[in-house]
Image (spheres, grey):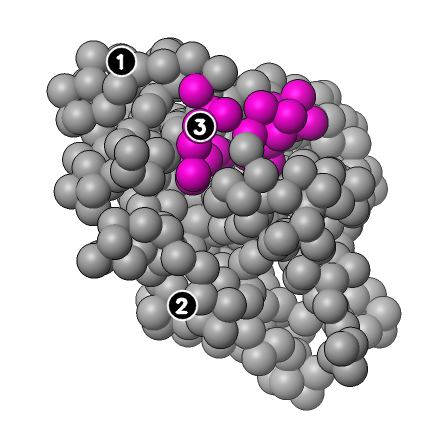
Amino acid sequence: MGTIVFVAREAADLETRVSASPETVKKMKGLGFDVIVEAGAGGLSRIPDGEFEAAGARIGTAADAASADVVLKVRRPAAAEIAGYKSGAVVIAIMDPYGNDEAVAGMASAGLSAFAMELMPRITRAQSMDVLSSQANLAGYQAVIEAAAVYDRAMPMMMTAAGTVPAAKVFVMGAGVAGLQAIATARRLGAAVSATDVRPAAKEQVASLGAKFIAVEDDEFKAAETAGGYAKEMSKDYQAKQAALVAEHIAKQDIVITTALIPGRPAPRLVTREMLKAMKPGAIAVDLAVERGGNIEGAVADQVAEVEGVKVIGYANMPGRVAASASALYAKNLLTFLETMVNKDTKTVVINLDDELIKATMLTYAGDVVHPAFGGAKKGDN
């Protein structure tokens, strides 16, 4: 019996994505694996069972997970799912481990080798495995589409015989992967776009997309960026200066999109009720950090909330709203990571504990929580 890979149907509400595509199934078959796809797993991503079958997979049920050596998922498996996995199985998913110690411990005690795709290091070798980037890219795109759909005016400037329609003013807060794609999408739709970020490197990227950069550019700003390229938390003094500048700017905007996330921390509050109150009637705000508590005061997960006369869009799973595209990219991220563990001669999955990708992403192994950030082995342990 060869190595069995099980592609699970997502149990979580509102999760429309799937962890494999016909293309990745074909490649896994090429690696010598037997692939079982749970019936209906790709339904909400527009991949019928027949397409997985045509690519070489067998369509199975949740019970087939019991024989799997590798389980691929979008979200961390729930306790009921874990109960059906065999000890020693490799489980790869977006694990959301921060603040979920009990769930991580549950995977350890089940004997699973659990990998969190979102902990993938941002190094050249791992670019094609970076799920945060692949999914944030689509979240940034979809944020603009959702805003445009709710906004009751046209986005581009239109000069007509009956008069001129002014361009919508869009302000993007946070110019990471999601923010940059939001800027590019809003520009394509003809909006007048501005953006802000606490990282100095973002200024050039924002300008290169034809948007105006808004920030307090003092010495603290010039020094602000972590070694991993993430945004650093700024001093209270800087935050106050930046908030004053942003508040003044937001009052003139039609659409505000917030994308600020700090790994493992609650989302920073960027837009207060006071700022929303200062916006024009009928203005729109989109909060891409609603799953981590939100950047916008008053945002409600999975709703368009009316806050101080502003429609605040708080869809928790924005990439899932473009599930067909998001799944295709996510499946490729998973496959590329899985390929790094394959022994080509034996056609088996071998975990090399010295590999930097394994070290960065492995949460549990051989009955223990092993990731240092989640209570695993600390330096100095025997």
Q: Is mark 3 on a helix, strand or loop?
A: helix
- Residue occupying image coordinates x 36% and y 14%: 60
Q: Is residue 187 above or below residue 380?
A: above
Any magenta on residue 82? yes
Q: What element carries label 1?
A: loop
Which residue is denoted by mark 3 in the rendering?
67
Position of 288 with respect to 53 (left or right) is right
Q: Which of marks 2 and 1 is in front?
A: 1
Q: What stretch is highlighted in magenta?
A: 64-85
Disc 3 residue type (three-letter): Ser
Residues 313 and 12: in front is 12
**Contact, CB < 8 Å: mark 2 with mark 3?**
no
Residues 7 and 366: in front is 366
| Spatial separation of the CA atoms under disc 2 and disc 1 | 39 Å
Crowding at mark 3 (Cα within 10 Å: few <14, some 14-19, many 20+)? some
Q: In this view, does 133 lie above or below 157?
A: below
In which quadrant will I find the C terminus? bottom right
| Image quadrant in which you'd find residue 156 | top left
Disc 2 residue type (three-letter): Gln
Image label count? 3
Disc 1 residue type (three-letter): Pro
Which residue is denoted by mark 2 in the rendering?
205
Which residue is denoted by mark 1 in the rendering?
48
| Image quadrant in which you'd find residue 72 | top left
Residue 209 appears in the rendering: no
- Residue occupying image coordinates x 61% and y 76%: 226
Q: Residue furthest right?
A: 236
Residues 16 and 299: in front is 16
Mark 2 vs 3, N-terminal side: 3
Q: Which of marks 2 and 3 is in front?
A: 3
Q: Residue 211 placed where, x, y %?
A: 41, 59
Q: Residue 188 placed where, x, y %?
A: 29, 43
